[in-house]
Image: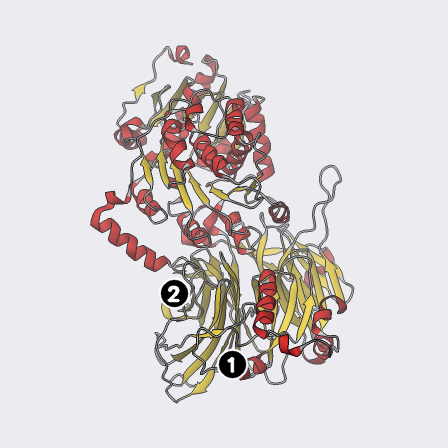
């Protein structure tokens, strides 16, 4: 072999190799056990990663080489894991993998972002003589299925929808896929054709499992429902699956908003019990009885869930493996890794039902990848187990921890020792349980996290509570400077061009006080009345601080509704028109693949709703590395019970040093308290409650006595007033439809929108209303926040809002930016208390509608 061996620098070589590998490190989305002659002792593990690869690793060789006694943390290298087999499976992330069949005929199936399901003979993979570096492209799949495309209204084909999960039915010769087009597909492996399509969900699918004992499948979706479909084989002639049961966890959990997506589902071994993971909750259902059993609250979002006989295991955004009973009681929690987990999947062996297999994977900011594999053999409950774990951090070493778990106690007792492993690209955390009655002693140390790598929710909460209990006001700072003109704010010239081109001439009160502190990188809490330019305030601050030569996401803006997120995107794009800003709105009801395509091409700002943004972060389509600004618009709604959990989860994935801006028209005490947990010495720009109601908007009430008299009163108003544009608010979607039909029966031209309508329909209606082709819009509180239609001169509260805070958001739809506006409230005898509460809340007097109301419009 040529070359001078005396000049060989092994340390330099290893460092170069590790740096190269670190570049290619990605999230592990799934790990699974291959078929093995000895199910109790698997000899390898398969890993599906976001770089599009499938790889297998030998467990025995890795564990046998682990230097358990090594404690020198300064060692430059110790061990590097090499795969036994490597497949370049997909063009994009591999989201799921399953084995189809056993023994030599087993197929390794995978699905991914490219919309394909591919399969390899496992025997060919294990017996390949091709060197590992060349296996990726050399080994061709024996199965290659691609999701169908759909024709749009003008004949154009849609993008191929991604596959987020797969399930198998060996007896039926079928594979099922959960796709991003809100459909599930049943594929026949012999003909390689779609046998059946399951349509019914209104948003993309997260998960799918096969309930083979009853010839059914179960799907979970972003739309907040799980659906049971069957009988699959009996319905093949119809080509379309039949939904036999819809499960809605949000109804039982009384949750609302985007936190109600079904992100994971699990079946027990008898296929009689179903667990649905939805944000920070689990719901358990008895399928034969179609009965809701219990709700389980978790401290972090649940990413995957499995059954262990009559117990439930779950993992999520905290580094803990939870064990619950079916009634919701916590039995134990295990520190399974230093960082949060994303997936756990447990399968019961067909030969030995007492053997359990579990896999975990995670994805978080600044953390390249972690996967977990658990193999547990059933033993008497008094026996102890120990496990070995290898974890990875993108900026730190691997950590080897050894822990003792006593299954005879509800709370595990663990001891661990932290050791350094030199490799940074080992994407696995192996947890191997060993039966043992011998007590092991180790130096107690937590399998820790490199400094600044992860947000510790509990420690941060404790620290914040100490600060607030000592002196809450010391948490805030003040900023008293007021700028009368935009030119005086020191903004970029091209930003000023965009501001003036948008139609601004003089900054509003909130803009005079709020733009500059945000431009200086300070955390800010800004409260001002609707229609005074809060959106332009934070948009200007964001645009001023962007590095336009770096086409990476540097600012993340969250909004409670799709409409508001899209409105913010338009304002951001318009103000930054001369700066060349790239903005994208990530909202539910739109194509996941399109979001991923745009994000991969590079943007400066992402605006979105919590559910879709968290999903993009989870998939690592949205990389948080360069995000330096985080904005919450309409914070009182975002941080209320329906959204605060998801905001909390997103915040944990962002870099440690980040500027936070919170903007809203109202700031209830509970929202203000939660806001403090995200911010560092924020500038507090608040207005008094008695200053909140809008200047330029006249507020009146009409006493209609009875509910039945409201409609005639409404028709009288429209027949006597000359109204440019108006919005009518009611409290239920059903009443929107009823009132729309009634108004049209009286020959009034009206439009209507509510949350049950699909996104395209709502977009068309809003475009018509903004353009003026539609002059009357009937809606629920869906449009009560942040939707700017400047021609609206009249708001009618056909029903009073159920909360005083929503009153301001409703009437703020009229009188935008100093224009005249009128708000009219219909009052029945049942509304006396609410109208009184509203007047007390805002310290205003709402007068009875005068006879000359036409002169006010």
Whether residue 690 is visible to the viewer of this picture, yes or no, is yes
Q: How many marks?
A: 2
Q: Is residue 741 visible?
A: no
Identify which residue, 155 or 586, lies in the foreground.
586
Q: Is residue 827 above or below residue 61?
A: above
Whether 132 is drawn above or below 315: the answer is below
Residue at 41% x, 17% y is 820
Q: Choose top left, top right, bottom left or bottom right for residue 138.
A: bottom right
The type of colouring in the image is secondary structure
Q: Secondary structure at mark 1?
A: loop
| Residue occupying image coordinates x 72% and y 46% | 150
Report the quarter where the C terminus lies: top left
Relative side of 189 to 835, left or right: right
Dot 1 corresponds to which residue?
66
Position of the N terminus, as image quadrant, is: bottom right
Give the labeled residue for mark 2. 328
Query: How far, Cα to Cα, is label 1 from label 2?
Result: 39 Å
Measured as percent of width and height from the top left, residue 463 is found at 29, 55
Q: Nearer the viewer, residue 405 or 28?
A: 28
Residue 519, image x and y in percent? 42, 36
Dot label at residue 327 = none
Residue that lies at the very extreme toward the right in this rendered image: 191
Residue 664 image offset from top left, x and y in percent: 38, 36
Q: Nearer the viewer, mark 1 or mark 2?
A: 1
Residue furthest out toward the left? 470
Tell me if 158 is positioned left or right of 295 in this view.
right
Q: Position of residue 736 (x, y in %)?
A: 49, 33
Q: Residues within 10 Å of mark 2 (few under 14, many from 20)?
A: some
Specify which label sits upstream in the sequence, 1 or 2. 1
> Element at badge 2?
loop
């Amino acid at each position: 072999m040529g070359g001078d061996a005396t000049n060989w620098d092994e340390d330099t070589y290893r460092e170069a190799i590790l740096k190269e590998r670190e570049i290619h490190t990605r999230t592990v989305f799934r790990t699974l056990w291959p078929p093995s002659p000895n199910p109790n002792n698997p000899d390898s593990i398969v890993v599906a990663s976001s770089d599009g690869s499938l790889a297998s690793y030998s467990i025995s060789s890795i564990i046998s080489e682990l230097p358990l006694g090594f404690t020198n943390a300064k060692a430059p290298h110790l061990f590097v894991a090499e795969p036994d087999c490597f497949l370049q499976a997909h063009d994009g992330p591999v989201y799921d993998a399953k084995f189809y069949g056993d023994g030599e005929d087993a197929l390794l199936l995978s699905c991914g972002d490219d919309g394909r399901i591919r399969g390899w003979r496992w025997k060919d993979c294990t017996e390949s003589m091709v060197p590992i570096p060349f296996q990726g492209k050399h080994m061709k799949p024996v199965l290659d299925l691609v999701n169908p495309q759909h024709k749009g209204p003008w004949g154009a084909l849609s993008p191929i929808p991604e596959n987020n999960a797969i399930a198998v039915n060996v007896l039926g010769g079928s594979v099922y896929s959960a796709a991003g087009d809100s459909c599930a597909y049943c594929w026949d492996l012999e003909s390689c054709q779609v046998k059946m399509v399951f349509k019914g969900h209104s948003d993309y699918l997260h998960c799918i499992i096969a309930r083979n004992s009853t010839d059914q499948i179960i799907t979970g979706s972003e739309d907040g429902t799980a659906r049971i479909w069957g009988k699959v084989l009996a319905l093949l002639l119809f080509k379309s699956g039949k939904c036999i049961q819809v499960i809605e966890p949000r109804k039982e959990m009384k949750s609302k908003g985007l936190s109600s997506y079904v992100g994971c589902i699990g079946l027990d071994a008898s296929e009689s019990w179903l667990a649905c993971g939805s944000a920070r909750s689990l719901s358990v259902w008895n399928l034969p009885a179609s009965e809701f059993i219990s709700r389980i609250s978790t401290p972090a979002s649940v990413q995957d869930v499995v059954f262990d006989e009559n117990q439930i295991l779950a993992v999520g955004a905290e580094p803990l493996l939870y064990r619950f009973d079916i009634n919701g009681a916590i039995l134990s929690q295990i520190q399974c890794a230093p960082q949060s987990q994303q997936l756990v999947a447990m399968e019961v062996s067909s030969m030995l039902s007492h053997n359990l297999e579990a896999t975990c994977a995670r994805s978080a900011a600044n953390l390249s990848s972690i996967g977990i594999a658990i193999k547990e053999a059933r033993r008497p409950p008094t026996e102890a187990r120990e496990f070995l774990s290898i974890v990875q951090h993108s900026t730190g070493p691997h950590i080897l921890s050894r822990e003792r778990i006593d299954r005879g106690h509800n709370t595990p007792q663990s001891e661990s020792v932290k050791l350094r492993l030199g490799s940074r690209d080992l994407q696995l955390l192996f947890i191997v349980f060993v039966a043992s009655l011998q007590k092991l002693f180790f130096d107690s140390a937590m399998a820790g996290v490199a400094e600044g790598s992860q947000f510790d929710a509990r420690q941060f909460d404790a620290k914040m509570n100490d600060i607030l209990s000592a002196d809450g006001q010391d948490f805030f700072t003040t900023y008293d400077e007021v700028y009368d003109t935009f030119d005086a704010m020191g903004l970029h010239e091209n930003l000023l061009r965009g501001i003036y081109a948008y139609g601004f001439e003089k900054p509003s009160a909130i803009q005079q006080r709020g733009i500059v502190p945000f431009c200086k990188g300070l955390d800010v809490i800004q409260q001002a009345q609707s229609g005074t330019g809060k959106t332009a305030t934070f948009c200007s601050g964001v645009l001023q601080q962007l590095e336009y030569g770096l086409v990476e996401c540097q600012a993340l803006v969250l909004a409670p509704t799709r409409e508001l997120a899209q409105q913010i995107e338009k304002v951001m794009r318009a103000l930054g028109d001369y700066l060349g800003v790239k903005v994208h709105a990530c909202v539910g009801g739109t194509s996941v693949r399109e979001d991923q395509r745009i994000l991969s091409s590079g943007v400066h700002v992402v605006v979105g709703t919590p559910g879709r943004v968290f999903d993009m972060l989870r998939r690592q389509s949205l990389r948080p590395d360069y995000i330096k600004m985080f904005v919450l618009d309409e914070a009182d709604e975002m941080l209320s019970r329906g959204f605060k959990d998801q905001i909390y989860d997103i915040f944990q994935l962002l870099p440690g040093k980040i500027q936070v801006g919170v903007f809203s028209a109202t700031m209830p005490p509970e929202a203000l308290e939660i806001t403090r947990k995200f911010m560092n010495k924020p500038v507090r720009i608040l207005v008094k409650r008695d200053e909140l109601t809008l200047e330029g908007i006249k507020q009146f009430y009409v006493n209609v006595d009875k509910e039945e008299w409201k409609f005639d009163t409404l028709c009288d108003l429209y027949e006597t007033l000359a109204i440019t544009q108006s919005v009518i608010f009611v409290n239920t979607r059903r009443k929107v439809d009823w009132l729309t039909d009634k108004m049209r029966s009286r020959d009034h031209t009206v439009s209507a929108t509510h949350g049950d309508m699909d996104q395209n329909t709502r977009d068309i209606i809003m475009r018509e209303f903004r353009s003026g082709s539609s002059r009357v819009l009937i809606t629920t509180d869906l449009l009560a926040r942040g939707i700017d239609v400047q021609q609206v001169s009249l708001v009618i509260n056909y029903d009073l809002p159920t909360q005083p805070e929503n009153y301001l958001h409703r009437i703020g739809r009229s009188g935008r930016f100093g224009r005249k506006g009128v708000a009219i409230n219909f009052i029945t005898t049942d509304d006396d208390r609410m109208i009184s509460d509203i007047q007390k809340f805002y310290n205003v007097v709402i007068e009875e509608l005068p006879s000359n109301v036409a002169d006010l419009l």
